[in-house]
Image (cartoon, rainbow, N blue to C red):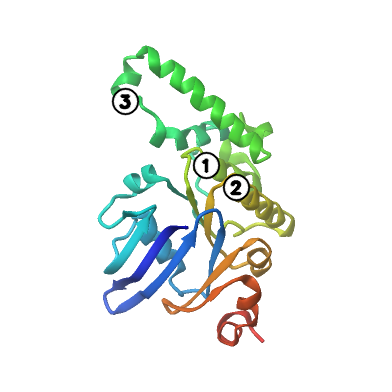
């Protein structure tokens, strides 16, 4: 069953066609990677799916809902969470508080209710804190919950970022270069975290340049070049595709 359907998607910036008639699906419960050289349109594709950019033409459907015209917060509320290539921690806040921010989209208490300290806001915040601690524990960083987030090692910040995204209770998680800036050991740990997330029943779509990571954890791979699809399939088939070898992987 396809959780995400992208049909004839196009994004034009003036004379530049960043995404050119791209179509693909992401099946529920899988890890799908999007790879390609710099400038291939990968991040633009993520921006279109998450609502950060409107498409020039084409359609994106998530769980049967047309995402056309929807704002990023509305798309997040539908169940699509996203991380970024550059880890973004809220300064002056602990790791736990950073994760709790991710629950905002699922909370019922608005600003006024919180200001007035309505009775249900206390119990909701307690539940948010409890769930956030559980997510940090799941990703192996519960021991840094009370530490200032920006002081953490880069790999720990990445795990906190994953936990914050999971706090939104997504069905689809978009990971934009999750291994960027990590060493070989941290990259291996990120790979294990992504598989663990998939095993929780969360579908993953990731953009990544580390081919060892991509080939190890992906169920399917989409290859872009100059905004166009040049190949799609299982890792073994992508590794043998002559066009992919020529353009991206190298002979």
From mark 3 to mark 2, how far is it between C-alphas?
A: 31 Å
Does 19 appear above or below 117? below
**Residue 187 at x, y percent in the picture:** 68, 57
Q: Quadrant of the C terminus?
A: bottom right
In the rendered image, the vertical position of residue 251 relative to residue 109, given as above or below: below
Image marks 1 and 2: residues in contact by CB distance under 8 Å: yes
User: What kind of element bears circle 3?
Assistant: helix
Q: How many marks?
A: 3
Tell whether 182 sits left or right of 81: right
The correct choice, above or below, for 153 with respect to 148 in the image is below
In this orientation, does residue 228 appear? yes
Q: Residue at x 55, y 31 (%)?
A: 132
Q: Which residue is mark 2?
A: 197
Q: Residue at x 65, y 38 (%)?
A: 138
Q: Which residue is mark 1?
A: 166
Nearer the N terminus, badge 3 or badge 1?
3
> Could you say which is closer to the camera, residue 112 or residue 81?
81
Query: What is the spatial separation of the Cα atoms under label 1 and label 2, in whole angstroms?
Result: 9 Å
For disc 2, the neighbor class at 10 Å (few under 14, some 14 to 19, many from 20) is many
Residue bearing mark 3? 111
């Amino acid at each position: 069953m396809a959780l995400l359907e992208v049909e004839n998607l196009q994004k034009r910036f003036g004379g530049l066609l960043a995404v050119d008639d791209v179509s693909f699906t992401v099946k529920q419960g899988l890890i799908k990677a999007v790879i390609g050289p710099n400038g291939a349109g990968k991040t633009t594709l993520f921006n279109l799916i998450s609502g950060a950019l409107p498409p020039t033409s084409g359609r994106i459907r998530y769980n049967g809902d047309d995402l056309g015209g929807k704002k990023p917060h509305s798309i997040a509320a539908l169940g699509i969470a996203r991380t970024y290539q550059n880890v973004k921690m809220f300064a002056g806040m602990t790791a736990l508080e950073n994760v709790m921010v991710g629950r905002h989209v699922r909370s019922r208490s608005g600003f006024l209710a919180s200001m007035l300290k309505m009775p249900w806001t206390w119990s909701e915040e307690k539940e948010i804190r409890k769930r956030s601690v559980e997510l940090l524990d799941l990703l192996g960083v519960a021991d840094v919950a009370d530490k200032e987030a920006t002081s953490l090692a880069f790999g720990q910040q990445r795990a906190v970022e994953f936990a914050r995204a999971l706090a939104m209770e997504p069905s689809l998680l978009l990971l934009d270069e999750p291994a960027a800036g990590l060493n070989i050991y941290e990259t291996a740990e990120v790979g294990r975290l992504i598989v663990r997330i998939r095993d929780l029943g969360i579908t993953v779509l990731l953009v990544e340049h580390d081919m060892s990571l991509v080939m190890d954890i992906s169920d399917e791979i989409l290859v872009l070049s100059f905004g166009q699809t040049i190949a799609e399939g299982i890792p073994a088939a992508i590794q043998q595709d002559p066009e992919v070898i020529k353009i991206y992987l190298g002979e």
